[in-house]
Image (cartoon, helix red, strand yellow):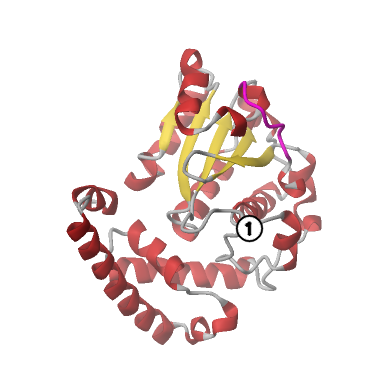
Amino acid sequence: MSFDEKLEEARDGEGSMKINEMEQTKVSLMRTYVESQDPSSRDPSSQKADDLMIRRFLRARDLDVEKASALFLRYLKWRQTFVPNGSISLSQVRNEVAQNKMFLQGLDKQGRPISVVLGAKHFQYQGSLDEFKRILEMYTQISTQSSASAFLISLADENSIKWMPPGQEKFVVIGDLEGWGYSNSDMRAYLGALSILQDYYPERLGKLFIIHAPYIFMAIWKIVYPFIDKNTKKKIVLVEKTKLRSTLLEEIDESQLPQIYGGKLPLVPIQDS
């Protein structure tokens, strides 16, 4: 049984309290183990392992301390090699930013930041995979902070969630594939994005709406789908074109919906958010 299923069973106050107590106990156990394996995570100034972050990794592994700890230690190692200085500058993602394909504006009805990714604006180039991963790191960081400027000042502060209401840790993505074709297909980038979301930022994705998916995209989707873990699969919605607006409005108020989908907000590039 997944964590979400366990939580669904614990709707009453007593059951919810038991879940919270169990979580807190496992957070403590996991912290002790992680700190024994990576002493740098003990440094409060590094903010590498606060309780909320540890809890996200635990939930991603259905509260299995051993599996969550292994995943978290891989994350710490990845951060040390991928972002050794604790920050990524705009100069490191210049080509990705120039494609003008990622946007961030508004909040859904649960207070989760809304981003839009335009798949038809993605193209491969030499060195594109590493840069694509960096802009995904940038995107994840910005969506959990109050502004791009705050992000650039302190990218390493993965726990800063000033952009979100108190208690909110997730974001929503609208993946728009209108105009997408084989020239935009990038299997390595898709698998890289999955790895970052599932292995390094688990339980950050609240929901992914895939819209305007052309028929040819489904051939790629069939290849990618087996690599998506069961918890992530539950958060993905393939939206029918005829139900696009009504589906989005179930989760997003019109005042917070991007204008291109019949809402009130203009698209804001992530570097300007």
Displayed quadrant of residue 35: bottom left
Residue visible at 55% across and 21% down? 212
Residue placed most toward the observer, 191 or 161: 161
233 on left or right of 253: left
Bin the neighbour count of mark 1 within 10 Å (Cα to Cα): few under 14, some 14-19, many 20 and up: many
Judged by its main secondary structure, the magenta piece is loop
Whether 188 is among the magenta residues is: no
* Magenta region, residue range: 262-268
Residue visible at 63% across and 31% down? 119
Whether 263 is among the magenta residues is: yes
Displayed quadrant of residue 149: bottom right
116 on left or right of 204: right
At label 1, the amino acid type is: Gln
Q: Position of residue 110 (x, y in %)?
A: 47, 43
Residue farthest along the front direction in this orientation: 13
Q: Looking at the image, is 155 positioned above or below residue 47?
A: above
* Residue that label 1 marks: 145
Q: Position of residue 11 (x, y in %)?
A: 22, 50
59 on left or right of 272: left
Q: Is residue 180 visible?
A: no
* Total numbered badges shown on the rendered structure: 1
Q: Position of residue 171 (x, y in %)?
A: 52, 47
Residue placed most toward the observer, 5 or 21: 21
Residue placed most toward the observer, 3 or 224: 3
Displayed quadrant of residue 225: top left
Residue placed most toward the observer, 96 or 150: 150
Q: Looking at the image, is 106 positioned above or below residue 215?
A: below
Residue farthest along the top direction in this orientation: 242
- Label 1 element class: loop
Q: Is residue 205 visible?
A: yes
Residue visible at 25% across and 70% down? 21
Q: Position of residue 245 (x, y in %)?
A: 52, 20
